[in-house]
Each structure stands twice: as C-alpha cells, then as structure tokens.
Image: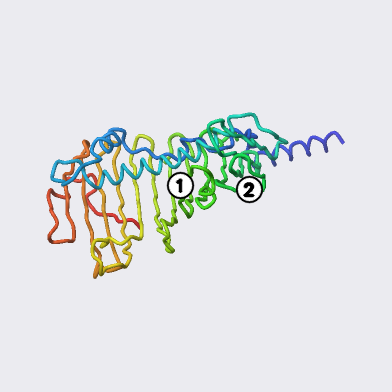
Amino acid sequence: MKNLKKTLSLLASLSLAACGAPIETVSFKDGLPSKEIARVDAPKSAQQRVDAMAGVGQQALGDVAGTWLVTGGTVLVVNGITLWTLGSLHFVAGFEPTSDDGNTAVWGPHTNEWERTTWKLTAVRTAPNAFRYTLEAKAKGTADTEYAPVITGSHTVAVDDDGKALRGYGEGQFIIDYDKAARLPTQESKRGRATFRYTRPRETEATTVQVDLSEFSGDATRPTTASYSYSQVPGGEGSFEFSADSNIHWFEPGKTALERWSIKSRWLASGAGRADVRATGGDLTGPSTVSECWDTRFASTFLDGSDATQQKWGAASSCAFTSPSYAR
C-alpha cells in the first residue's frame, strides 16, 4: 500500500509537470484591461510636431511630411478613443464592488453628482486569468429596464512561464455600441459600432491593435467603414495601416462612387519612415498611388506618385524603407 501511494504521488507530480504550472487566479480589478494596454505610441517628438503643425498647408521638400501628419494624427485619435473606453471601465471599477462571489463581480449602480448617467459594470470570470465584462448605462433616475450595454469585451491576462500573472499585459477585445451610447444624456448622436482587438504579450514584445469601424453620419443610410491596424515594438520599429471607403471626388458633382483608399506607414526607432498611399475602384480608371519618406526630424525627403501633375522630389534610396508596401 505504501508503494502504491508513492506511485500515485509520482504520477500526479508528472501529470502536473506535463500540464505546466498552475495559472495564478487574478482578481477582477486586475482582470480588466489597463488604459495603456491597447495604446500604440508613435515617436514622442512626432506627436509634438503633429500638434504644432496641424495647420500646415502647401507642402514642400523639407516641410513636415504630410503623410506623417495623417499617421500621427490618427494614432492620437484612436488612442483617445481607447483611453476614454478603458478609462470608463477603470473609473467604475475604482469603487468597491457591490457584489463579488468569485465568479461574477458587479460595480454600481454608480452616478456622479455632476452627471446625468448611471453606470453599472459586470465582470464574469471564464478562467483564472480570463474575464468577460459589460459596461451598462442608463439616464439617471430611469427604470433599470433602461440599462443598455454600451461597452462589451473580454480580456485574458498574460502569464509567465511559472503561471504568474503579468498585470498590464494580455490580449482581448472590446466593442463600443454607439447606438446604445446615443440614448444617454449629453452623448453625441453617432450610430454604428467600433471593434478593438489588441495584444500586448510582454514588455519586450510588440503591441498590436486592430480597429474596425462602421458608423453612420447624420441621416445616412450607408455606413462609413474603416479599418485601422497598428504594431509597435517597444523602442523599435512601428507600423500603421488605415483603409476606408470614401468618395475622393467629393468636389465633382458627377462622381459619387466610393473609392477604396489606404495608407500604410512604417517607421524606425529613430522616427525616420515611409508612407505609401493607394486609391482604387469607384470613379478611378486605375490605381492612384503616392509615396513619401521622412527623416528623423519628420521632414519630407522623398515624394513620388502615379499622377504626372503631382510634385515629386528626392530619391527612394534615401528612405528608411526603399520599396513601397501598401495596406491590405
């Protein structure tokens, strides 16, 4: 019997080793994605230049690159949406939960004195380090049946080789439902939704963010669709892609078809980089392209395009990336 117990103990040990170390159970508060987890940073000096040069008009050789302004400006806008969304989660979760049975935690209802909106956050554990969450809201003073899910998402906290949680790192997604948000007091009447997917595995690995937008403006019956994609290695190379269906001939009454236009930007840790722009379909008879490079000061060093009337300068051989690469 004694030998049997030893054998069973050994088998249990081998079984645990084969399955890997047990994963640490993460608290609900640490299981929500941090405000920084889905942020992608362009070089800091570039962001400062974007703010300072927002009114740039005609561009010339040596001016701040126009395609970099588009890149840096879009990074700031999307990061702003991310900050607002995840900041809202952490604001509500900053209070003590109303209930927590280990599998489900609820915060709220909570209403700020200066707001006309009541919030409630619910998180459900799906694994020791994984969670689903819903942020609901309603107009202050209305019935609980008026709660609407404004933000829904899921998040898995990264773990190291020993199963210990790497707080502030992980992967997941969240969806903003603008139709539901528009019902709330003081919110803009935007319709549609935005879906964010992100991965931030470890401190030394690349952060990636994918954003898909489908929005209606005014009384439009056809949504404006767009797709953003980012990748940033800490202290290293980064890339950005943006694609959208838009009428680039809006100033010509006879041309109303939508073209597919996209921009793909790549940059080194120094800040030097390249952007390649392409438009296809719609009222175009063929693809239209523009390529631009910038130096470490974000000044344009190279510009070329398919339009014979477009300004052109510099040599592609001087670019951080010498060959074009277009968004998918």
| Label 2–label 1 contact, CB within 8 A | no
Left or right? Give the position of 170 relative to 321: right
Residue 205 percent location from the top left of the image: 43, 39
| The disc label shown at residue 102, or none | none
Q: Nearer the viewer, residue 100 or 323?
A: 100
Q: What colour scheme has been applied to the protein in the rendered image?
A: rainbow
- In the picture of the structure, the residue carrying the numbered disc 1 is 188
Residue at (48% x, 51% y) in the render: 195
Which amino acid is tagged 1? Glu
Q: Residues within 10 Å of mark 1 (few under 14, many from 20)?
A: few
Q: Name the residue: 18% across, 45% down.
A: 57
Secondary element type, mark 2: helix
161 left or right of 212 in image: right
Residue type at the position of mark 2:
Glu
Image location (x, y in percent) of residue 120: 62, 39
> Is 167 rendered above or below residue 138?
above
Image coords of residue 269 (percent x, y)? 30, 37
What residue lies at 31% left-to-right and 51% top-to-bottom? 264
As drawn, 122 above or below 179: above
Residue 137 image offset from top left, x and y in percent: 58, 43
Give the mark nearer the N terminus: 2 vs 1.
2
> Where does label 2 land, which residue?
146
Specify few, some or many for label 2: CA neighbours under 10 Å numbering under 14, 14-19, or 20 or more: few
| Vertical position of residue 62 compared to residue 164: above or below | below
Front one among 6 and 307: 307
Would you say 44 lies left or right of 157 here? left
Q: CA distance from mark 2 to mark 1?
A: 18 Å
Residue at image position (79%, 35%) is 6
Q: Quadrant of residue 243?
A: bottom left
